[in-house]
Image: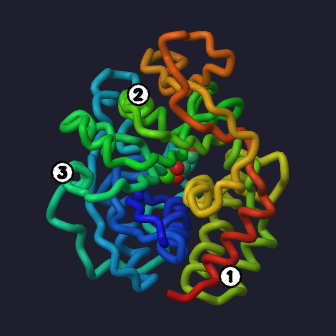
Amino acid sequence: MAEKVILDVDTGSDDAIAIATAFLSPDIDLLAVCTVNGNRSVEITTSNTLRLLEYLGADVPVYRGCHLPMVASLTPGRRKHVPFTGPDNKEEDVHGDYLPLPEPTRKAQPEHAVVWLVDKLKNSKEKITLIFVGPLTNLAMALRIDPDIVKNIKQVIIMGGGYLVNNITAGAEFNFWIDPEAAKIVADCGAPLVIVPLDATHAAYVTMEEAEEFINLGTPGSVISGKLIKQRIAGYNAFQPMAVPNAAPIHDALAVCALIDREVLRSCMTVNMDVSIAHGITDGMSLFDTGGRDRNRKPNAIVAKDADREKFVGMMKEILGRKN
Ligand code: BDR
Ligand code: CA
């Protein structure tokens, strides 16, 4: 039976591919997509999410979420600026502002994502899997409103953090760095966590030739994904070249594939993960206690240090090549 899933995104080029993968996979019953500030303002990430779903002919409700991190933007100098956009945004070419799709005719649902999440999780008769591929603000806010919702969370699959690889500072990954307090609240919430960090997503890079193959599959999901992968590769070539030239990670789609087939993740360790809220140079850094040094913190997460690239690309082709 298909797994019931709530997906939380900051769409975003790789978020868009993650949404398409989740919607088109027969193994996932996509209950709703929640949006958050991150790659762009929540206005833009919500519009992009609606654009993508409408293009796919997907009748999935969208709930607009938080427009700022919990507290990170209150301290002067702690963040360049939030929402994270503008001419000095190195990732600009990786995401762009709006997806290259028509403006949506549908609107987001009237309830706020956090209010809906609390209600949905509180009243659910079964446990629900959450996949979070943006800053964790919405889930942390929901947990602060009602910590009991954790009982109905089957697992949280999170694209975030880095073991040896980071991307926004020397020590931090973008999603955790945007809202470190939210990431820490989720790390400590008690729900089973599966962490898909940059080490895994960078191992599962996609090449320019493969992007072309996606486009040649000719379905709505594969065509938009192939185009967005090309856009990402151009951005990576310009601003953060990969060890393999003409290739880019599709971070958020790997988190979705990790639910569909856990074997796509490799070198998984069960450890305690904590997140630095120390401001300064370690702000938003993920810490993995591989030696079990902190006796007060028990293992709370399965963390992937690697991924099966061939399997990932194969899964993506099979799923995105499907018609709605
Ligand atoms: C994460 O940051 C965002 O730019 C991507 O969408 C992904 O979720 C990678 O660090
Ligand atoms: Ca994202």
Element at badge 2?
loop
**Image coordinates for residue 72, horizontal then vertical, percent:** 34, 28
Q: Which residue is mark 3?
A: 115
Residue at label 1?
215
Residue 324, compared with residue 187, is above or below; it is below
Cα gap from disc 1 to disc 2, whole angstroms: 41 Å
Residue lying furthest left in this view? 110
Q: Are marks 1 and 2 in contact (CB under 8 Å)?
A: no
Mark sitting on residue 247:
none
> At x 72% / y 62%, what residue is drawn?
312
Q: Is residue 124 above or below residue 49?
A: above
312 vs 190, left or right, is: right
* Quadrant in the rendering for residue 257: bottom right
Is label 3 in contact with label 1 (beta carbons under 8 Å)?
Answer: no
* Observer-nearest of 168 and 188: 188
Circle nearer the N terminus (2, 3):
3
Q: Distance from label 3 to label 1 (Cα)?
A: 38 Å
Earlier in the chain: of badge 1 and badge 2, it is 2
Disc 2 packing (10 Å; few <14; some 14–19; many ≥20):
some
Residue that mark 2 sits on: 188
